[in-house]
Amino acid sequence: MTEDRIAQALRGKLRGEVDGSARRCAEYSSDASNYRVLPAAVVFPQVEADVAATIEFARDNGLPVTARGGGTSVAGNAIGPGIVVDFSRHMNSVLELDLQRRVARVQPGVVLSELQRRARPHGLRFGPDPSTENRCTLGGMIGNNACGPHALAWGRTSDNVRELRILDGTGTQRTLAADPSVVPGLSEFTRASLAVIRTELGRFGRQASGYGLEHLLPEQGSAVAKSFAGTEGTCGLLLDATVDLVALPPATVLTVLGYPDMACAADDVAAVLACAPIAVEGIDARLVDIVRVHRGAGSGAVPDLPRGSGWLFVETAGESPAEALAAAEILCRSVGALESRIVTDPGVAKALWNIRAEGAGLAGRTPDGQPAWPGWEDAAVPPERLGAYLRDFGALTRQHGVDGLLYGHLGDGCIHVRLDLPIADAPQRFRAFLFDAAELVVGYGGSLSGEHGDGRARSELLSVMYSPAVLDVFAGYKALFDPDNVLNPGVLVAPQPVDSDLRLVGLPGTPRVGGFAFPHDGDDLGSAVHRCVGVGKCRADTRASGGFMCPSYLATADEKDSTRGRARVLQEVVRGALPWSSEALAQSLDLCLSCKACRSDCPAGVDVATYKSEALYRRYHRRPRPIDHYALGWLPRWSAVANRMPRVANRLVDVRWLRRIGLRAAGIDSRRELPRFADRSFRRIWRDLNAQVEPARSDADPMAAEREVMLWIDTFTDAFAPEIALAAAQLVTSLGYRVRIPERNVCCGLTWISTGQLDGARARLRASLTALDEHVRKGGIVVGLEPSCTAVLRSDLLELLPEDPRSAATAAAVRTVAEFLAEQPQWRPPQRHGRSVVVQPHCHHHAILGFDADRRLFAAMGVELTEIAGCCGLAGNFGMQSGHYDISVAVAENGLLPALRGAQDDSILIADGFSCRTQAAHLAHRQSRHLVQFLLDE
């Protein structure tokens, strides 16, 4: 049965959605692992009956079934060749909070952070807290027996499971708790297996590989529900779970301990544990360095750490802040660290903990920039043997010529590491390293996995860790729940080889064909799109923390519109499984706003905006394009024409029926209001001022009078908002500089880039380089006013014209207004104490240029600042295109519109981006100010 027929046959049996399209199957072909398995269809159940119908259909048609939550599994246990069931779309509710019993009943698709949000006002939380808590689901956590930093105090997920309601592989509903009789034959099976279970399982806290059958022992309470945790979807599909909640500690203190290296830190874990901390995390200096580079020097920069090259982050708790602090002081006196720092400031503590949270994504590159992969990232050994293990593990990686960054739960003996595994050399070097690594960890009495499960990455290696008798017991346990091997076959029991279905094996190269160069990925688009390893941060709602990624996913909650989903489809294209002209790719990229937030917010640096531009270039190169590519992509050309007769152009726009017909013909949504051309463009005004503004005298900096600043006059400012450029010229000259503008009416090519017309973009950028060359060679700087155009000169220029030696010098000369002002040591910002300001950072400002200089400027002005997190929704040509209006409005409802509705009546909206100002005026009827205008306001 083909994918289309499977989806069609199943669709009539469910209330939820079924999708067997090539695009959808590509999106679900991988999780956060190295593996790729295309499903036949994806099911989004709305009700429990949908889950039952899916299992029945799969059994009748010989199809396997794989459960999936957030898709953040690093071991390849959330993908499968038959039907993938995504619980996160609809079955995602907290059904009950019982405060008296301290339990919650949840559906499998509920995201952990949502449960924590609901429990927190009552002083409660779910104990385990993996770093992916803002996108991982409770179902996935139960499937993989997830842990997190605080498992040291509150245990693994299995320790916090009270009751599970499941459908087993036969479609039978069972309620698992502490009664083995609910599963026929389980009591007899346990009695027959007691010797094997007692001698080989549950030897230390992080022995997570295989099934957790030690929970079935009578002395463990015959806890069937706990034994089910960690079965990785091989024994049943979860309908709901009753889980324990724990009390939030009244007070906590973070202590950072510095050591010569991670192994020395591990040697000291016993002394740390003797002080009864609730979390002990380790992190390597090289990973901290990467985080520093990623965060930059702004408000999110890494706080100072104690002396050392390896650190333990230790959290102590108490009934009061004084008690927690006293525990931290005792800790510092008891350990052998080089240096320690007790952190009492919650903001600093959060910034430090975020280093650990960012590790999974940022560790995706080795220190020398090579891609690093999951596959051997969760090994655990008894904590007292961890230091010795780490030294031998370092020797093993050097022997095999692999490298990576260490971090993890040192208090539990669990180490995370991403290595530049020789996947392209599979099976030889890849397989050899994994088996040698398995032998090493087993020799230390450890576990292949300390959390996250075994999946496709480690199931075959279980034969290294366990005797044949244990493997037989695992097979027997699965057979009681899934006798026909319907659920996630090839995982844990009768496993597939570790080198089967690797996503990166056998990939053809995707060299440059005239578009972007991808210099950070070996000039290969295939390598660039495979930056995405699926950590899934793009599925998290990060607006509260200032994140911008991914605006369309925040509006639709559809994997199709996540950065990861788009990357997966692009990966199918570069491997040759889908053509560049495929409808699957067009659908995948359609709602990408090209905001570039993924480039900065994605830990792996995935840049879908650039990939989209490249994809459009390859699809339409020397072929007819959609009409809006000409209407919007050539906007600077049409603006140059309109600038000759702006009043005529505006009068034509004012004719409603003519505007409606014209917009539809141009591929623009007729509900859009078109911006009005200024009566005179800035360039015309500038010419009337004799093309220069005399520098003002500056007593503060007499040398400044000899210097010049080049204002980059973009099309939007020139044609629609010349008053902004005039304000900028006034501001710059007030500092004693002479203002220049490019003599030629040049353009950065932004609209050509966003529509994938890259030959035209390069032509315009070459002309821009020529216009700026003399000024830049003399050491002059270029100040941009429109963030998107400024970002092109700072970033896209280097990737579209890398061979031109002028590109790097020009990019280095470009400044935002706030950056320029920050370089003026004698300048003092005007004071605006008490003024209420709402600022909408342009997405490209956030992602490429960085907004920290602006934040510091606003802070120095003393304003009451509300900073909007997220895209405005217009995003250049995106919100203008026919078919995008509704999603554009929905994106605006994620940040811009609620912020404006909640603002004070006298608040000022500052938006440097033309799109942001246009969207605010159209949807909220709010006028905006550019930063330069606000600085000059009296």
Image (tube, rainbow, N blue to C red):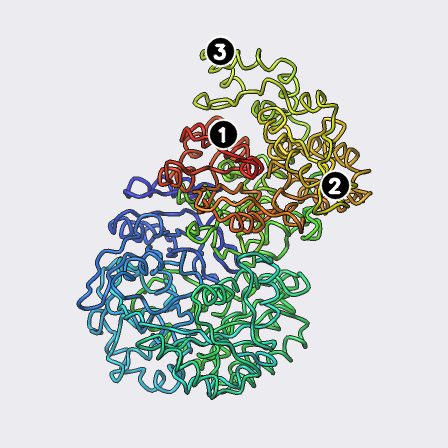
Tell me the residue that label 2 is attached to: 801
Query: What amino acid type should be assigned to the residue bearing mark 3?
Result: Leu
User: In this picture, is 68 found above or below 575?
Assistant: below
Circle 1 SS class:
helix
Numbered label tally: 3
Q: Residue at x 58, y 20 (%)?
A: 678
Circle 3 SS class:
helix
Q: Residue at x 36, y 43 (%)?
A: 18
Tell me the residue that label 1 is attached to: 918
Residue placed most toward the observer, 402 or 45: 402
Q: Is residue 575 visible?
A: no
Query: What amino acid type should be assigned to the residue bearing mark 2?
Result: Leu
Marks 3, 1: nearer the viewer: 1
Residue placed most toward the observer, 788 or 634: 788
Q: Is residue 729 visible?
A: yes
Relative to 604, is 9 on the left or the right?
left
The extreme left residue here reads 100
**Do the residues under discs 3 and 1 have CB atoms within 8 angstroms?**
no
Q: Position of residue 64 (x, y in %)?
A: 39, 55
Query: What amino acid type should be assigned to the residue bearing mark 1?
Result: Thr
Residue placed most toward the observer, 494 or 649: 649
**Do the residues under discs 1 and 2 have CB atoms within 8 angstroms?**
no
Circle 2 SS class:
loop
Q: Residues within 10 Å of mark 1 (few under 14, many from 20)?
A: many
First reached walking from the N terminus: tag 1 or tag 2: 2
Q: Residues within 10 Å of mark 2 (few under 14, many from 20)?
A: many
Q: Position of residue 307 (x, y in %)?
A: 60, 77
Q: Where residue 658 is drawn, which disc sits there?
A: 3
User: In this picture, is 102 found above or below 339?
Assistant: above
